[in-house]
Image (tube, helix red, strand yellow):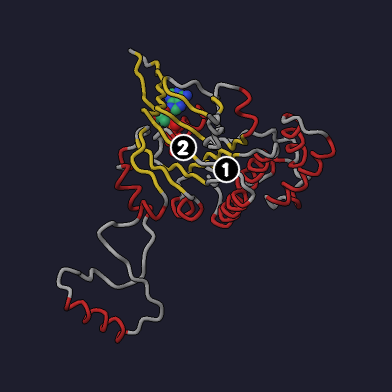
Amino acid sequence: MDPAPASTSVPAAVTISGLTKTFSLPGVRNKTTVTAVDDLSFTVAPGEIYGLIGPNGSGKSTTMKVLLGLMAPTSGDTAIFGRDSRDFAARTDVGYLPENPYFYKHLTASETLYFYGKLCGLKRAPLRERTQELLALVDLEAARDRRLGGYSKGMLQRIALAAALIGSPRMVVLDEPTAGVDPAGSRKIRDLVISLRDRGITVFLCSHLLAQVQEVCDRIGIIARGRMVNEGTVDELLSVKDETEILLRHATPEALAAIKKSLIDHPKTELIRTGHPEASLETLFLSETNSEDSLDT
Ligand SMILES: Nc1ncnc2c1ncn2[C@@H]1O[C@H](COP(=O)(O)OP(=O)(O)OP(=O)(O)O)[C@@H](O)[C@H]1O
Ligand SMILES: [Mg+2]
């Protein structure tokens, strides 16, 4: 008998499986606990842009930190490209943009990238080349010799992104990549994220900018109180199953009248409205997460 064929299935870029994380909070009188992540499971496929959205305190950053091995889970498992997050080797394939990136303010942009590149074990010549390439990618070539102490918030986010990419990772984990960045700057970051996918890099991000998440993400997970409340592609999340949209270009009033008239023969079909389609990830987000009562308030 022939041996069974070897499995060709590629491991997921991110595997979160039954993850729970609780923190104990020492109080003045007694100790309380908070459940930041509650039996959470999802996967991110290689090459995908996956966006996790949720209100403040819903467990997005905690999930990312456990995935990156920066925090131990209370229970459950997480893995990166099939390797357990607790295994140090799992992290070599990942670049991370933390929620509040910290920098040595006296270093210039190129010195900063040199520093992080050395930490990743890059040799001098390839590092020089990589630094040049990344400064161009994040549009900071003109500011390469300025100290980070004089950088604006948007410039700091972009240098943080470049630092996350210095080791040529297969995946980047971006915790609020556009936090505090103006619309033009966050558009640049959005384009950068799309260009990462074009190079085959997996992107796992969380953000409060719903319109941007909607634009760039292949799939979205909506998290509330540490639990996944909805997940899917943008189309899946936003499609209203019992409604059908007909999109017309250059519709004249006569054409609309003719369509309405033709429905007379179909009394069960109801024309709800005619008008321009609207994006509404925000409406879905608010209704699914009951955002007004976030854990942090
Ligand atoms: N180190 C910690 N010690 C105690 N509690 C923590 C710690 N880190 C997170 N928490 C709590 O866990 C919950 C989830 O926090 P987390 O930072 O993961 O939320 P988030 O979704 O990233 O929120 P935001 O959108 O504000 O960044 C919150 O209630 C938070 O106060
Ligand atoms: Mg966070």
The residue labelled by disc 2 is 43
Q: Distance between the residues labelled 1 and 2?
A: 12 Å
Q: Classify 10 Å Cα crowding around label 2: few (below 14), some (14-19), many (20 and above).
A: some
Q: Is residue 77 left or right of residue 31?
A: right
Which residue sits furthest top? 29
Task: Examine the image and state in which quarter residue 56 appears.
Answer: top left
| Residue 94 in the image: above or below residue 73 | below
| Residue 246 in the image: above or below residue 32 | below
Residue type beneath disc 2: Thr
| Residue 112 in the image: above or below residue 152 | above
Taking depth in this image into account, of 9 and 108 the one nearest to the observer is: 9
Q: What element carries label 2?
A: strand
Which residue sits furthest left? 267
Q: Classify 10 Å Cα crowding around label 1: few (below 14), some (14-19), many (20 and above).
A: many
The x, y position of residue 88, in whole percent, is: 61, 23
| Residue 120 in the image: above or below residue 131 | above
The x, y position of residue 17, in whole percent, is: 43, 29
**What residue is drawn where x is 17% and y is 77%?**
265
Taking depth in this image into account, of 102 and 225 the one nearest to the observer is: 225
Residue 202: assigned label: 1
Residue 38: assigned label: none
The x, y position of residue 221, in whole percent, is: 41, 42
**What residue is drawn where x is 26% and y is 84%?**
258
